[in-house]
């Protein structure tokens, strides 16, 4: 059953009426409802197009957080073959908010790493809602080092509200682990490409996305802080999240203009959750093209390419 966002309530009513009519027909009530249901379907399609034609930044945040949106585990199942998960940071524990391992993309061996939020109450608790602890970042470092040793391209899938801010995480060196992961991204001599598939929250996202090429799905967001957190700090009122979302310039379209995202990936009408298969195929094509664009570059050139990319951030100015 589709979960609707707040601004989709009128759409929910129309789609609900169409489904009710078809349910009556399936129940054998002897009524021909197909013509009326088809008219409702057409009205719903037009409304969906209008709703998504010009989403506000806050609505983009809502779509990026949609609970039915495909997550890292979904992309790995759909896009990669021979996936072999690797666990643990060889120091403290295995962080289930971060998943990764060896795999093949289009028969090319790669290392894939990503945040996993979970898709029901049990898995969300197990995955800590995609908020990694220090051991998650140290696991990612270990996998990136392995990829560098064996010359494997690294693919990262970013989808996190941010790194976990709990007491235990801080005691185990959360900020140091994030910094080390970011440093490792910048140091490895193999191609590194990243896709923001949902939320790109603060340092928790940067630690995976300091890549040669960064792509963002059309309705994903990437920001130093959540709109609610920003509103709480600036206005002492988390309800001003809409104004904060506008000010943060966190949409994929804004970040592409500013040169932070290198590529935008189209989503199906209504967001990736309405047609996950299509969304994931679009991501597959983008990954293959981004990796292909880095072929032929040696380790030194790849590191220099990454260095120049991040040193140039901000050169376009906020007026872009």
Image (cartoon, helix red, strand yellow):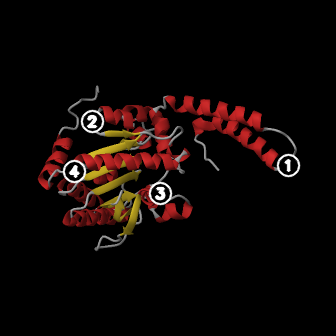
Q: Is residue 15 above or below residue 100?
A: above
Q: Is residue 29 above or below residue 299?
A: above
Q: Quadrant of residue 261?
A: top left
In the picture of the structure, the residue carrying the numbered disc 2 is 259
Label 3 or label 2, whichever comes before in sequence order: 3
Residue at mark 4: 295
Mark positioned earlier in the residue sequence (1 or 2)? 1
Residue 199 visible in the snapshot: no
Is disc 4 placed on a helix, strand or loop?
loop
Name the mark on residue 28.
1
Q: Position of residue 302 (x, y in %)?
A: 17, 50
Residue hosting label 3: 74
The answer to whether residue 272 is above or below residue 253 is below
Q: Give the residue at x 23% y 55%.
A: 185
| Number of disc labels | 4
Q: Is residue 194 left or right of residue 305?
A: right
Q: Is residue 61 above or below residue 280?
A: above
Question: For the view shown, which residue lies furthest in the right direction?
Answer: 30
Q: Disc 4 and disc 2: Cα gap in Å?
A: 22 Å
Earlier along the polypeptide chain: callout 1 or callout 4? 1
Is 43 displayed left or right of 59 in the figure? right
How crowded pointer 1 is (Cα within 10 Å; few <14, some 14-19, many 20+) is rated as few
Q: Residue 110: percent from the left, percent from the top?
A: 30, 60
Q: CB atoms at circles 4 and 3 under 8 Å apart? A: no
């Amino acid at each position: 059953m589709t979960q609707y966002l707040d601004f989709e309530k009128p759409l929910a009513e129309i789609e609900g009426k169409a489904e009710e009519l078809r349910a009556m027909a399936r129940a054998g009530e002897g009524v021909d409802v197909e013509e009326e249901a088809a008219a409702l379907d057409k009205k719903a399609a037009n409304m969906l197009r209008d709703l998504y034609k010009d989403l506000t930044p806050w609505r983009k945040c809502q779509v990026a957080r949609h609970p039915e949106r495909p997550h890292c585990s979904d992309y790995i199942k759909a896009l990669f073959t021979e996936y072999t998960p690797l666990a643990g940071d060889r120091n403290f524990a295995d962080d289930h908010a971060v998943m990764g391992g060896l795999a093949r993309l289009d028969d090319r061996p790669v290392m894939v790493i990503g945040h996993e939020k979970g898709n029901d109450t049990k898995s969300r608790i197990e995955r800590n809602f995609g908020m990694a602890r220090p051991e998650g970042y140290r696991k990612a470092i270990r996998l990136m080092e392995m990829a560098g040793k064996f010359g494997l391209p690294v693919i990262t899938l970013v989808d996190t509200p941010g790194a976990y801010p709990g007491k235990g995480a801080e005691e185990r060196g959360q900020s140091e682990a994030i910094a080390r992961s970011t440093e490792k991204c910048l140091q490895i001599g193999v191609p590194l490409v990243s896709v923001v598939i949902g939320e790109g929250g603060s340092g928790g996202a940067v630690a995976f996305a300091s890549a040669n090429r960064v792509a963002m799905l059309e309705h994903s967001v990437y920001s130093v802080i959540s709109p609610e957190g920003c509103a709480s700090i600036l206005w002492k009122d988390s309800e001003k999240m809409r104004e904060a979302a506008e000010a943060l310039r966190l949409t994929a379209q804004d970040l592409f203009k500013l040169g932070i995202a290198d590529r935008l990936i189209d989503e199906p009408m209504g967001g990736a959750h309405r047609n996950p298969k299509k969304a994931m195929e679009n991501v597959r094509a983008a990954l293959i093209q981004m990796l292909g664009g880095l072929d032929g570059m040696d380790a030194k050139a790849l590191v220099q390419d990454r260095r120049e990319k991040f040193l140039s951030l901000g050169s376009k100015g906020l007026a872009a």
